[in-house]
Image: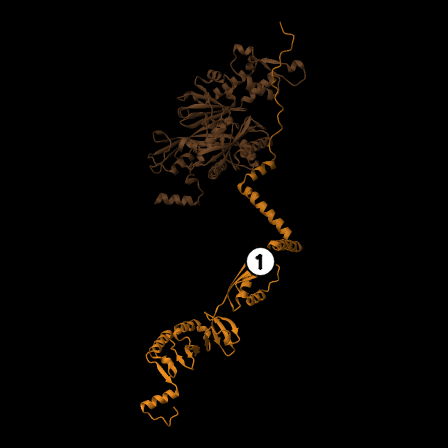
Chain colours: A brown, B orange
Amino acid sequence: MTDLYQAQRAMRNMRRAAMQRGVIAILDIGTSKIACLILRFDGTDSFGDDTVGPMAGQSSFRVIGAATTRSRGVRFGEIAVMAETERAVRTAVQAAQKMANVRVDHVIACFSGAEPRSYGLAGEIDLEDSVVTEQDVARVLASCELPDIGHNREVLHAQPVNFALDHRSGLGDPRGQIGNRLATDMHLLSIDGTVVQNILHCIQRCDLELAGMASSAYVSGISALVEDEQELGAACIDMGGGSTGISVFIKKHMIYADAVRMGGDHVSSDISKGLMVPMAVAERIKTKHGGVQATGMDDREMIEVGGDSGDWEKDRRQVSRAELIGIMRPRVEEILEEVRARLDAAGFDSLPSQQIVLTGGASQIPGLDGLASRILGQRVRLGRPLRVQGLPQAATGAAFASTVGLCLFAAHPQDEWWDFEIPAERYPARSLKRVVKWFKDNW
Amino acid sequence: MQPLSAPRRTPTLTVHPLRRDPAPSRWAYRMQRLWLTPLFRVMFRVGVPTFVLALVVGLVLADEDRRTAIAGGITEIRTQFQNRPEFMVGLVSVVGASPELADVVRARLDLKLPQSSFDIDLVAARARIQELDAIARADLIVRSGGVLEVAITEREPALLWRTEDGIEMLDASGHRVASLAARSDRPDLPLIAGEAADSATPEALALLAAAAPIADRVRGLVRVGERRWDVVLDRNQRILLPEEKPIAAIERLIALHQAGDLLGRDILTVDLRTEHRPVLRLAPYALSQLRQSQGIDISGSQL
């Protein structure tokens, strides 16, 4: 626990150092593609301040390099074959560096797998003084009791989402306010520790340093949800290749995140099995002719399946589009129903606004919004990531929601638990800070 | 009813065989990152060529023989260029000097002609020529056609200076021009004498100019004690001039002479050294005549 706390603090410092140098790389390790963007920060506006800069920091950076490569060795958003993944990361990073013509040393990575689990934490303290200080915030955060997150699991995000002072709740920043009891609600996202270790190792083997990590469900929510959706409550469904991430936002804070270990690759695999074609052909048929809503015309639209067997009968196979939809639809329904179950378990029904935004590469299946609105509720829309400066046209699609979200996350990160001070009680007995605090309290 | 022909082949969906892994090798990746490092790029673009150049030059010049060969080659090219016919000087023409002086100047130049104009040290040659007393100024110009022109301005003799060794001609500034065998060679020039008389030549010329009304009687000037002048006239008459303002004194004397024919009388010296009291010294006969006319008996006296 403390190790990861220290590691996260170290990553924050590294991110700050990268900001000083002005160049940082964004790495989205997905199941179907690995995307690398290189950002140049040339704005002089400060990022460490509490004030939100113009456009939440989006105006301060520019994408100067972008590259995508087919992902290898990644399954369900987790690294399955280390060497393959390392080569894929190298390919993406090298191409992006070549485009940017600059060398990057610091990388912020996001991934979708590793079984994220959300926990809501609550903490409460009596204020020593009637005025809330930084130390009080630190103490109230420390007072949150850590649930049993399981063996070999690490904390990826731990964000205070709400502060309450006496009977007043919903405070963003309680510092300087007067009251007696300070309470906080914290959202904690835990992930599998070995996955993190693998990603860390993989990035180190590419001679890069990890300056931050994020859950891809979270960052695609940042980029795909518009501001009022984040404020009033919305869920972002990031349908990736190997896993589908779910993140629920309200009051501009993520309050829940989860992942379904199914995605677009499973649809392709169904097509591959159903039509007896290679995976690459299945993928191509899916993207070219796929759909989830069959109409009468689809019976007449014949798709040449082909094959390289040399057998005339096999190479001349044709399927109608209706058949293809018949293969795809059950799997997409299964994914959406699983998402529905996760959202129900999280209590999404009780949110004031129940907007659902579908994004990610697999959300581009024609007719998906119609199907999703039947399963998830009426308020479904397809989301595309925000436009950021310098982003190539090829990287503006829904498949790049988490990549773009990670850029925004890098420019303007949410305050996390490790960004606050350590409460003085936690310092070692002979620490100088403890002495300073004693002097402050007594004079 | 089904057609007998096979259905038209639509473009097949077979994908191109996937390229083999496009990933860069570990070393290619590292080299690219190294190449993108700004310091390394600068080192590679500036440092390496500089180093290689320095290394090559150093290796070439490390050998003593090669160094001398290179130096010899450069010298040879230089000599060849300098010895081209258009730079050769074959003739010295002396302008503005008498034939005898021109011969002296040629002998003094002492150039082995023909010679390249690069090899002739004109400054030294000019200094050598200007050492000659008879020459006031010499200008050396290499003209086209291989001619070294020596333009000479001769010193004009203005005075004769009689010394123990003989007679010298001096110019107006007192610089020696040449020796003279006899006074009669240049009767047109005035004569001066005395130790270090040449250093006061301008004053002597001014005195002579002031004494122009009695020029026919002036035999010369004598420098006394390196400080003042005597004017010597014929009949051994002598005018002693003061150290200060000798010209005013001589003008006064000329006024006296024109008023009362002073110098035509039987006088040995006129002493003008004291400004307000000129003193005359009479010849012995004149003195005795004067005494007799004043009724002074001088029979026993030597005077």
Considering only vertical position in the picture, is B121 above or below A104? below
Which quadrant holds residue A281? top right
Instruction: Specify the quadrant that holds the N terminus of chain B.
Output: top right
Task: Say whether residue B134 is visible.
Answer: yes
Q: Residue furthest right?
A: A310
x and y, in percent, of residue A279 in the image = 60, 21
Q: Viewer-proximal residue, A106 or B96?
A: B96
Q: Viewer-proximal residue, B218 or A266?
A: B218
Would residue A16 appear left or right of B250 to someone viewing this image?
Answer: right
Task: Say whether residue A149 is visible.
Answer: no
Which quadrant holds residue B12? top right
Would residue B231 appear left or right of B51 to someone viewing this image?
Answer: left
Query: Tag 1: residue type?
Result: Val
Instruction: Specify the quadrant that holds the C terminus of chain B.
Output: bottom left
Q: Residue at x 57, y 46 (%)?
A: B47
Considering only vertical position in the picture, is A242 above or below A209? above
Considering only vertical position in the picture, is A380 above or below A176? above
Q: Subunit of mark 1?
A: B
Identify the residue under disc 1: B147
Q: Residue at x 36, y 88 (%)?
A: B287
Label 1 neighbour load within 10 Å: few <14, some 14-19, many 20+: some
Q: Residue furthest left?
A: B294
x and y, in percent, of residue B32 in the image = 57, 37
Q: Residue furthest bottom?
A: B300
x and y, in percent, of residue B148 in the image = 57, 59
Q: Viewer-proximal residue, A190 or A146?
A: A190
x and y, in percent, of residue A301 in the image = 56, 12
Question: How many discs mark residues in the rendered view?
Answer: 1
Q: Secondary structure at mark 1?
A: strand
